[in-house]
């Protein structure tokens, strides 16, 4: 569910039955729980790549993919990858989806 009061939208590209996607979602939630500067400002939107042929062609080999604006993090379940993505200053000053 999209919370329109949030000023940052993180998109997590996934597909049903993807255990790596489940791992990435859990890691993202843990990282946000430890980031009070972002936690209340972020909405996570999950997008099933199977729902769109273009998304399937683009992300089939790299899901889970975490995106913020034009920034993307393929294989977002890698240790430390989500933390580094969130720590990048662009999330606080320009990583918004419109």
Image (tube, grey):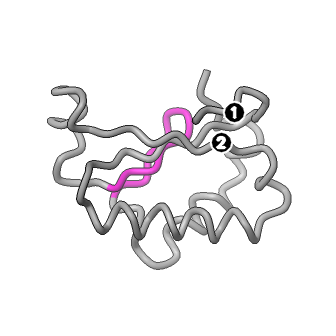
Q: Is residue 49 left or right of residue 72?
A: left
Q: Which quadrant holds the N terminus? A: top right
- Kindly identify which residue carries mark 2: 43
Query: Residue 68: where, in percent of width, then height?
Result: 55, 40
Residue ID at (63%, 71%): 30
Q: Is residue 6 above or below residue 73?
A: above
Say which element carries label 2. strand
Left or right? Give the position of 52 relative to 20.
Answer: left
State if disc 1 and disc 2 touch (CB < 8 Å): yes
Q: Residue at x 24, y 30 (%)?
A: 51
Magenta region includes residue 29: no
Extreme residue toward the right, this view: 37
Does residue 51 lie above or below 28 as drawn? above
Dividing the image into 4 quarters, which one contains the C terminus?
top right
The alpha-carbon separation of the residues under discs 2 and 1 comes to 6 Å
Residue 96 is situated, as x and y percent measured from the top left of the image, at: 65, 32
Marks 2 and 1, the one that precedes in the sequence: 1
Q: Which residues are magenta?
A: 64-74
Q: Which x, y percent locates residue 32?
A: 69, 62
Where is residue 81? Give x, y as percent. 49, 69
Magenta residues, dominant SS class: strand
Outermost residue, top direction? 98
What residue lies at 71% left-to-right and 26% top-to-bottom? 4
Q: Quadrant of residue 52?
A: top left
């Amino acid at each position: 569910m999209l919370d329109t009061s949030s000023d940052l939208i993180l998109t997590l590209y996934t597909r049903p039955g993807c255990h790596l996607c489940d791992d990435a979602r859990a890691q993202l939630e843990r990282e946000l729980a430890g980031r009070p500067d972002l936690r209340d400002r972020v909405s996570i939107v999950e997008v099933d790549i199977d729902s769109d042929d273009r998304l399937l062609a683009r992300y089939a080999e790299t899901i889970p993919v975490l995106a913020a604006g034009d920034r993307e993090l393929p294989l977002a379940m890698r240790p430390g990858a989500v933390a580094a993505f969130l720590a990048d200053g662009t999330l606080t000053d320009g990583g918004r989806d419109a």
